[in-house]
Image (spheres, grey):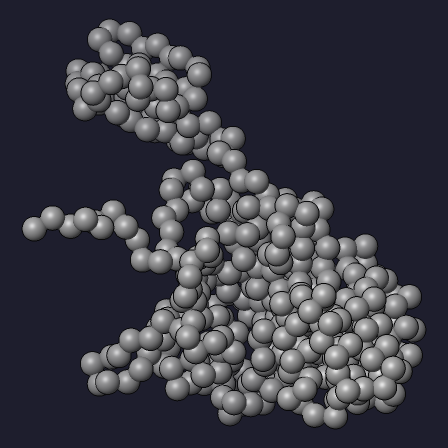
């Protein structure tokens, strides 16, 4: 019986071919080195987690979870993010390690797509979690590290938008009076549907003053100057958030990354566990954020070890797209030999590899079309018969 879909992959799954894999490996190595130099230790968690713990705490929509049953009938999930698994580890295997704890990861996460639309269901994230420190110093450190990591990876033109969940929550409760009505507006902000937001506000049964407050929110983007405008929109509740942002900007200036940061009071994340500072990284090459993060001060409590925390995650596939990843420039050499020259070919390959070069050693009798095959390499060395000759391509 034939298999008509033998070459198909599950929805949202992708192959990584050799060239892209090599580029990804190079970028990943640079990023990991930078993160280690800031004192973060890398950790690895299982691909499978229990649904009742990590699955429910992940803040990823239930319909996006890949679920399966183990031999005992317990529901498992492919990890949909890394923040919840790390919170589990910190509260269990690392429960005797005192705060603050600086951890990092480079892991694949899995989120089911109802309709693919070009979106991967499996993708790799590189990120950090700073757990047990609720200061603005921690907020600034994590944002500065994200900026530094992107720069070291080779990204030049990008911006990090910074907002505050606390400000939005307080403003909407002040004006609207209840969380249900606030949820509607937050959904518009998450979708970045500002036209829909404005239309919805205009139809609310509010005074003209309160409508203006909600509409003026859309203009709160820029530098430190927008903090004063933000103060004019809120009574008391949002003032703490504004103070946090002002202190954050002052510390980011000490790191020398203030030119990469813009304030955006409309910024809202779908990650429901965020409680304070939130941020996203953008570049002109992409129409969507390539990295994001925020403060989550309540998630650890769900695992029995309360702590304030903040972290970020960088989508490696998005970063490579922004970098316009191309074939690595490192030369690849090939030694094509005949059977009687096998010893010389192997010795030559050893010599070149000791020089740090990538070398393929190929028996000519195993190649169908020598011209086509040799065209794959930048340099070809023939060790055939009594002579050795090389060709640069």
Residue 329: horizontal and vertical position, in percent?
Answer: 52, 30
- Nearer the observer, 174 or 309: 174
| Residue at the image point whose x is 83% and y is 80% from the top | 211
Asked which quadrant contains residue 272, the reply is: bottom right
The image shows residue 116, relative to residue 311, as above or below, that is: above
* Residue 234 visible within the image: no
Q: Relative to 91, does residue 109 appear above or below in the rendering? A: above
Please tell me which residue is depicted at 45% across the width and 62% down the height of the picture. Answer: 107
Q: Considering the image in quadrants, where does the C terminus appear?
A: top left
Please name the residue shown 78% across and 84% down the image: 171
What is the x, y in percent for residue 101?
A: 59, 76
Q: Which residue is at 28% across, 85% downward? A: 74
Q: Give the answer, above or below, for where 195 lies relative to 385.
A: below
| Left or right position of 184 against 86 | right
Residue 178 in view in this figure: yes
Q: Locate residue 350: give its quadrant.
A: top left
Instruction: Looking at the picture, tell me which residue is in the foreground, 68 or 126.
Output: 68
Residue lying at the far top in this picture: please name it: 386
Q: Where is residue 133 in the image (x, y as percent from the top left)?
A: 67, 80
């Amino acid at each position: 019986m034939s298999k008509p879909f033998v070459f198909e992959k599950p929805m949202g799954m992708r192959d990584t071919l050799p060239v892209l894999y090599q580029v990804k490996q190079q970028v990943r190595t640079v990023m990991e080195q930078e993160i280690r130099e800031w004192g973060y230790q890398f950790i690895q968690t299982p691909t499978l987690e229990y649904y009742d713990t990590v699955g429910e705490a992940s803040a990823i929509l239930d319909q996006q979870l890949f679920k399966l049953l183990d031999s005992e009938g317990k529901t498992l999930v492919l990890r949909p993010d890394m923040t919840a698994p790390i919170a589990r580890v910190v509260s269990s295997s690392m429960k005797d390690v005192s705060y603050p704890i600086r951890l990092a990861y480079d892991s694949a996460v899995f989120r089911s797509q109802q309709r693919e639309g070009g979106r991967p269901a499996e993708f790799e994230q590189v990120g950090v979690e700073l757990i047990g420190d609720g200061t603005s110093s921690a907020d600034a450190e994590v944002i500065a590290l994200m900026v530094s990591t992107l720069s070291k990876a080779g990204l030049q033109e990008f911006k990090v938008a910074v907002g505050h969940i606390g400000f939005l929550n307080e403003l909407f409760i002040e004006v609207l009076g209840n969380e249900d009505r606030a949820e509607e507006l937050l959904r518009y902000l998450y979708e970045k549907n500002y036209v829909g937001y404005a239309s919805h506000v205009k139809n609310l049964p509010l005074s003209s003053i309160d409508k203006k407050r909600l509409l003026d929110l859309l203009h709160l983007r820029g530098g430190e100057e927008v903090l004063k405008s933000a103060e004019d929109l809120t009574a008391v509740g949002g003032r703490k958030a504004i103070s946090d942002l002002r202190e954050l900007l002052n510390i980011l200036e000490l790191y020398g990354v203030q030119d990469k940061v813009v304030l955006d009071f409309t910024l809202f994340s779908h990650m429901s566990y965020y409680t304070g500072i939130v941020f996203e990284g953008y570049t002109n090459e992409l129409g969507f954020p390539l990295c994001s993060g925020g403060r989550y001060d309540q998630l650890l409590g769900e695992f029995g070890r309360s702590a304030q925390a903040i972290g970020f995650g960088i989508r490696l596939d998005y970063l490579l797209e922004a970098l316009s990843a191309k074939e690595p420039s490192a030369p690849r050499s090939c030694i094509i030999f005949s059977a009687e020259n096998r010893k010389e070919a192997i010795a030559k390959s050893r010599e070149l590899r000791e020089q740090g070069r990538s070398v393929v050693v190929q028996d000519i009798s195993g190649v169908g079309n020598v011209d086509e095959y040799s065209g794959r390499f930048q340099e070809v060395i023939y060790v055939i018969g009594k002579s050795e000759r090389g060709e640069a391509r």
